[in-house]
């Protein structure tokens, strides 16, 4: 036996320091929130107003400070939540030091450590195999090669792969950032907020708006300078238009919604390893479940041993097979509980470890002969005991066949000796959780490596639709993805599914336009979890499974999934609402600036006016709407839907404001009175947009929009507020005209957005 490093050697060796996938540094968070294009533009405009205008018109600059502080605080909260959960999620690594087995944290593995491997273990560092007992390693995540690779002493193993069968050990030769997988996918392993339809949509909005701001802003500045004798007034008017065009709070609200989603899910012991996964949660319409460990509770109990031949050492053979692996799976543990130790004379020679692809394990015990234990429909092939095994499986019982074999590793000349049954417990929360998904329109597919009849029995008991129509995956087409997709759509339960087939199932469903979530806990689920739109691992699952999943249910509770899906839907639906608000403002500012610039007239309001109306109709309501609960499932087409709402609403708001300003300006009123009339129209039209976006109205949404209207009305009656915001609504005819124009505009906005098909009902 190789003894490994001593504690003294490990203390001075290079450690496995790798950035956590779920987190980024404080400096990166600060840079992302401070150094943005919008902050630069608003900062320059802020300085211009402070230099040439009145300080009251510079209030919009406080938006920079608020955006930066709120964004940093929320991301730091999310970072702390993620880091704490990530530590819980990190599976300890088994190493041999000072001649004995120890468990250390992944970051405590050092160069030269002797790392021990068993089924389901993920390789975190590169190394050279020194011990192998039927060790098989899956390198498909690195090479794309589906078949496990047998590893012998002297063979190289790479980080990013995982053990699927057997046992062994290797010496770490490359750790930390030198390891193969870290070099290969450094970017993919870092915390990131990007690559999702939502963030791409927001980024595209910002990009196009930036292109528009420059020429329109230049036109507006030119027209204001040309038509104003006061340079300060001209600059203030131009800044009012440019600042209103910028959706400065949209990115902030998006970040807050994601960050709060992470924190809320963290309270349910749910680790989000990639923030875009929250968006994936909202889009899921097919949920693929593994039976074992997901619908059924972990572990099982040996029930009956049913001999098929008299005079055979069934119990001794079972005990010997169950004690082959130093890290037994749930089946072996159940047999061990009944038979704590193997009998004398049952020392194993050649062994074949269990794998999900083979669906059996075995060993040659010398004089006692070769024995195998595995799936009856794989080993018996219609022979003795086959019908009895099928009848037992139909009740939902897990059944294995014990057979003698003429030789290994091919398991030829099998003689059935006994059937072994195991009790499985359905998770107490499974039934209600499945009902939730049915109500939400999410189709459930049960995909298992077990007997399809047994899987169907359990799924039927859980009232999964069409659960009685199970399919044996071995009979499915392998080279016809379209036919496979049709069968997947028409059936709900699949048994005897190989790890590679699970991956094919995910791809076939995605090809038919589905957004697929996959749950799993075993090493046989890794490939499918990696390819799914959303991979969800159970907390008690294998390290390899948890490593590739975007979401990990740390408390191993299936009932957490509704919270996960609900949070995703809340984030996406509410960010769409908030985007409608901010981009309506952007489009009415663009239209106003264009019309004012071309017509060569004064801008209808000052920066302080836009600060007031934006706070009451966008800023404050958006904060509440971005965090509100919702059950709507997100649909593709985020950008077109937002544009269909924001463009007509923004154009009509701009037309109403300009009409109100011109109507007032044509009389004998002062510029401040004319602007006050325009501000009243601006508030009323954008407030109505808020009402439409807040639908369906419930008590708190009615209270929210009512409070915003009351705040504006109270502000108009308070002398110091009117003085601060330069409002003089004293001209009754201007005020009535503004209200009348607003009512007409509100009706037109309602009709326009309804025609566009964007109203939420």
Image (cartoon, helix red, strand yellow):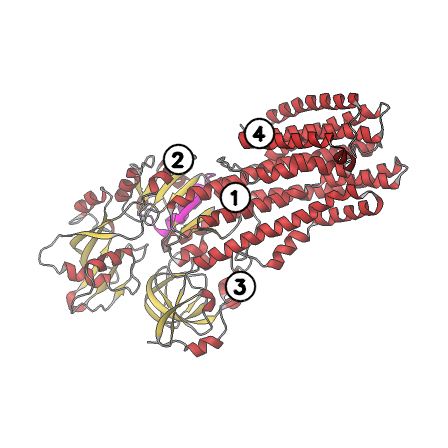
Residue 635 covered by magenta stretch: no
Which corner quadrant of the image does residue 196 belong to? Answer: top right
Check disc 2 and report the residue beneath it. 438
Extreme-front residue of the structure: 719
Distance Cα–Cα, label 1 vs label 4: 28 Å
Q: Residues within 10 Å of mark 2 (few under 14, many from 20)?
A: some
Mark 2–mark 4 CB contact (< 8 Å): no
Which corner quadrant of the image does residue 168 belong to? Answer: bottom left
Q: Quadrant of the N terminus?
A: bottom left
Q: Nearer the viewer, mark 1 or mark 4?
A: 4
Q: Residues within 10 Å of mark 1 (few under 14, many from 20)?
A: many
Give the left or right position of residue 579, taking residue 245 as reference.
left
Give the left or right position of residue 312, taking residue 398 as reference.
left
Residue 195: image location, x then y, percent:
57, 48
Q: Residue at x 56, y 32 (%)?
A: 701
Check disc 1 and report the residue beneath it. 279
Query: Which of pointers 2 and 4 lies earlier in the amino acid sequence?
Result: 2
Q: Residue at x 33, y 66 (%)?
A: 167
Give the magenta-colored segment's residue range: 496-519
Check disc 4 and report the residue beneath it. 702
Q: Nearer the viewer, mark 2 or mark 4?
A: 4
């Amino acid at each position: 036996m190789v003894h490994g490093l001593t504690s003294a050697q490990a203390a001075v060796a290079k450690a496995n320091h790798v950035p956590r996938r779920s987190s980024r540094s404080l400096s990166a968070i600060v840079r992302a929130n401070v150094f943005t294009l919008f902050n630069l533009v608003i900062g320059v405009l802020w300085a211009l107003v402070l230099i040439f205008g009145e300080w009251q018109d510079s209030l919009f600059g406080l938006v920079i400070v608020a955006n930066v502080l709120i964004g940093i605080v929320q991301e730091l909260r999310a970072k702390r939540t993620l880091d704490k959960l990530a530590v819980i999620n990190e599976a300890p690594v088994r190493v041999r030091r000072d001649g004995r087995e120890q468990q250390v944290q992944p970051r405590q593995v050092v160069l030269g450590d002797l790392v021990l491997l068993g089924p389901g273990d993920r390789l975190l560092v590169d190394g050279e195999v020194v011990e192998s007992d039927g060790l098989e390693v899956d390198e498909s995540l690195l090479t794309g090669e589906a078949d496990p690779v047998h590893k012998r002493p002297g063979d190289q193993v790479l980080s990013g792969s995982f053990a699927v069968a057997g046992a062994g050990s290797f010496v770490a030769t490359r750790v930390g950032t030198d390891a193969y997988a870290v070099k290969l996918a450094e970017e993919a392993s870092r915390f990131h907020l990007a690559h999702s339809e939502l963030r791409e949509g927001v980024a595209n909005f910002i990009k196009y708006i930036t292109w528009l701001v420059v020429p329109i802003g230049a036109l507006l500045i030119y027209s204001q300078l040309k038509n104003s004798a006061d340079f300060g007034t001209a600059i203030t008017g131009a800044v009012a238009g440019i600042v209103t065009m910028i959706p400065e709070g949209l990115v902030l609200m998006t970040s807050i919604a994601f960050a709060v989603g992470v924190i809320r899910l963290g309270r349910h012991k749910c680790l989000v390893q990639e923030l875009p996964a929250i968006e994936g949660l909202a889009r899921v319409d097919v949920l693929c479940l593994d039976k074992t460990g997901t619908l059924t509770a972990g572990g099982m109990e040996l029930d009956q041993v049913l001999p098929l031949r008299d005079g055979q050492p069934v119990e001794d053979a079972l005990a010997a097979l169950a004690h082959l692996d130093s890290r037994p799976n749930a089946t072996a543990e159940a047999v061990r509980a009944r038979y704590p130790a193997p009998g004398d004379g049952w020392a194993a020679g050649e062994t074949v470890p269990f794998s999900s692809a083979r669906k059996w394990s075995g060993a040659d015990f010398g004089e006692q002969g070769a024995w195998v234990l595995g799936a009856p429909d794989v080993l018996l092939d219609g022979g003795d005991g086959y019908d009895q095994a099928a009848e037992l499986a139909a009740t939902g019982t897990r059944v294995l066949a014990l057979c003698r074999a003429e030789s290994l590793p091919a398991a030829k000349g099998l003689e059935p000796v006994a059937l072994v049954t195991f009790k499985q417990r359905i998770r107490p929360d499974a039934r209600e959780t499945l009902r939730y998904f049915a109500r939400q329109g999410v189709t459930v597919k049960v995909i298992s490596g077990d007997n399809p009849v047994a899987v169907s029995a359990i799924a039927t008991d859980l009232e999964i639709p069409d659960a009685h129509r199970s399919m044996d995956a071995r009979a499915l087409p392998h080279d016809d993805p379209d036919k496979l997709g049709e069968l997947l759509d028409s059936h709900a339960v699949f048994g005897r599914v190989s790890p590679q087939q699970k991956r094919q199932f995910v791809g076939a469903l995605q090809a038919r336009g589905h957004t697929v979530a996959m749950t799993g806990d075993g090493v046989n689920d890794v490939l499918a979890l990696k390819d799914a739109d959303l991979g969800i691992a159970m907390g008690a699952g294998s390290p390899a499974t948890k490593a590739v999943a975007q979401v990990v249910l740390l408390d191993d509770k299936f009932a957490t999934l509704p919270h996960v899906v609900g949070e995703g839907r809340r984030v996406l639906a509410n960010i769409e609402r908030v985007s409608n608000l901010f981009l309506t403002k952007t489009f009415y500012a663009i239209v106003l600036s264009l019309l004012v610039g071309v017509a060569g007239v004064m801008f209808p309001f000052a920066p302080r006016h836009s600060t007031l109306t934006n706070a009451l109709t966008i800023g404050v309501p958006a904060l509440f709407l971005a965090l509100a609960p919702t059950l709507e499932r997100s649909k593709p087409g985020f950008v077109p839907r937002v544009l269909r709402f924001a463009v007509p609403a923004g154009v009509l708001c701009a037309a109403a404001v300009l009409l109100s300003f011109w109507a007032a300006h044509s009389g004998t009123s002062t510029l401040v009175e004319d602007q006050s009339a325009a501000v009243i129209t601006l508030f009323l039209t954008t407030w109505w947009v808020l009402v439409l976006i807040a639908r369906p109205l419930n008590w708190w949404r009615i209270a929210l929009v009512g409070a915003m209207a009351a705040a504006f009305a109270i502000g108009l009656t308070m002398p110091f507020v009117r003085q601060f915001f330069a409002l003089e609504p004293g001209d009754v005819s201007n005020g009535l005209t503004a209200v009348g124009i607003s009512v007409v505009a509100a009706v037109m906005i309602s009709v326009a957005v309804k025609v566009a098909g964007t109203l939420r009902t």
